[in-house]
Image (cartoon, rainbow, N blue to C red):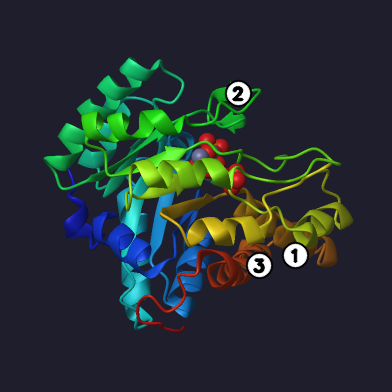
């Protein structure tokens, strides 16, 4: 064990999810790849008093460097405390592809991991998820697994169509694996192109309801939940970006899901769009600028402001903990 999450000031997701389900909100899980995204996420969550899950994919961890990730997360906690806030911060592996990656993350300070066996056959998914849960729990780390397949791109896995989670499988799956939360497929998908123009952008809240009945109170996770705000798509285009037919999940549907047993909602694409729109705008308006602080900060601020809005209107997690300010 190189670093234990508790020594970095991080929290696992157990109490976060219990409180979220009791109080009818969901915990935001925001992906990051760099320092400015961490700053934006923490500032948004501190200013609203929301708990937060900082998550990195395997690709993002390779990009940042696995030695850097635990210290960025430790710095995030210190930053929140310095602003006077007591929000819990988790460091989570998003879409862990196998046992070895999950184990390595646990040994490098992660407080939570996802084992994504959703592309395996049912029994193989159970076997792998159970193996990860046993190892993780021996270190106090919480585990998310997935049943059903989201359409779109997930790291290296590309699926053309949704394979909705089958409610009749969930009880057996959570019992036999011992995992702490379950990601389900109900029509959300990764990336900026979730629906086609003319589609009715609806997720299957009826399947969610059916799943809740089978495992009452068990924390459910929604992936692929960016709303793809038109204002950032338009800004991207205005300042030279190319992004056609980008349509996300309507906020009202996510708000309904948040009030249910959904305890964690994943958002990455919205942050990427806000960050990139801010950078494009700053560079286009100041062509002589080459100080990275001057064009990265506007991107960070767009991301922070958007996440604050989302916490208030979608996650419902505002004020769950003590607010702070810069
Ligand atoms: O679900 C995927 C996340 O948005 C992470 O994407 O693998 O490109 O870092 P990434
Ligand atoms: P989006 O692409 O909708 O932001 O989803 C992110 C996600 O699910 C990360 O695991
Ligand atoms: Zn995902």
Disc 1 target residue? 289
Q: Quadrant of the N terminus?
A: top left
Q: Nearer the viewer, residue 69 or 153?
A: 153
The answer to whether 164 appears left or right of 161 in the picture is left
How far across and down, in percent of the image, does residue 212 sit? 40, 47
Real-space Cα distance between discs 3 and 2? 31 Å
Q: Are marks 3 and 2 in contact (CB under 8 Å)?
A: no
Please name the residue shown 38% across and 28% down the image.
169
Observer-nearest residue: 286 or 121? 121
**Helix, strand or loop at mark 3:** helix
N-terminal-most mark, 3 or 2: 2
Q: Residue at x 81, y 67 (%)?
A: 286
Of the four image quadrants, the one with ligand 2 is top right
Q: Position of residue 161 (x, y in %)?
A: 64, 25
Cα distance in 3D space between marks 3 and 1: 19 Å
* Mark 1 residue crowding within 10 angstroms, few (<14) / some (14–19) / many (20+): few
Task: Tell me: residue 284, above or below residue 183.
Answer: below
| Rendered position, 6 above or below 129 | below
Q: Is residue 120 visible?
A: yes
Towards the viewer: 233 or 71: 233
**Residues at circles 2 and 1 in contact by the CB criterion of under 8 Å:** no
Where does the image place residue 98, in percent across and percent down from the top left?
Answer: 34, 24
Mark nearer the N terminus (3 vs 1): 1
For label 3, the residue is 302
Judge depth for marks 3 and 1 and give the one in front: 3
Mark 2 highlights which residue?
159
For the point 43% across and 40% down, which residue is it? 183
**Which numbered disc, 3 or 2, marks the residue closer to the eye?**
2
Q: Secondary structure at mark 2?
A: strand
Q: Residues within 10 Å of mark 3 (few under 14, many from 20)?
A: many
């Amino acid at each position: 064990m190189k670093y234990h999450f508790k020594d970095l000031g991080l929290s696992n997701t157990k109490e976060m999810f219990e409180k979220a389900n009791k109080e009818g909100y969901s915990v935001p899980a925001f992906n990051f790849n760099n320092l400015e995204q961490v700053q934006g996420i923490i500032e948004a969550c501190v200013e609203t008093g929301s708990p937060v899950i900082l998550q990195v994919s395997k690709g993002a961890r390779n990009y940042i460097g696995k030695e850097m990730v635990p210290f960025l997360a430790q710095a995030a906690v210190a930053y929140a405390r310095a602003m006077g806030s007591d929000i819990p911060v988790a460091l989570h592996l998003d879409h862990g592809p196998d046992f070895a990656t999950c184990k390595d993350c646990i040994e490098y300070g992660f407080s939570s991991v996802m084992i994504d066996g959703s592309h395996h056959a049912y029994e193989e998914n159970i076997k792998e998820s159970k193996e990860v849960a046993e190892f993780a729990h021996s270190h106090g780390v919480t585990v998310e697994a997935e049943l059903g397949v989201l359409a779109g791109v997930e790291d290296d896995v590309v699926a053309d169509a949704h394979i909705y989670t089958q409610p009749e499988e969930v009880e057996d799956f959570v019992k036999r694996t011992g995992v702490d939360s379950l990601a389900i497929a109900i029509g959300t998908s990764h990336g900026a192109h979730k629906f086609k123009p003319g589609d009715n952008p609806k997720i299957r809240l009826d399947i969610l309801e059916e799943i809740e009945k089978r495992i009452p109170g068990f924390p459910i996770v929604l992936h692929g939940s960016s709303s793809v705000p038109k204002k950032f798509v338009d800004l991207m285009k205005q300042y030279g970006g190319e992004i056609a037919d980008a349509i996300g999940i309507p906020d009202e549907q996510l708000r309904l899901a948040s009030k249910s047993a959904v305890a964690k909602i994943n958002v990455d694409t919205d942050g990427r769009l806000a960050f990139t729109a801010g950078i494009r705008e700053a560079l286009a308006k100041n062509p002589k600028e080459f100080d990275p602080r001057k064009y990265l900060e506007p991107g960070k601020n767009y991301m922070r402001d958007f996440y604050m809005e989302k916490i208030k209107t979608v996650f419902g997690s505002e004020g769950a903990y003590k607010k702070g300010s810069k």
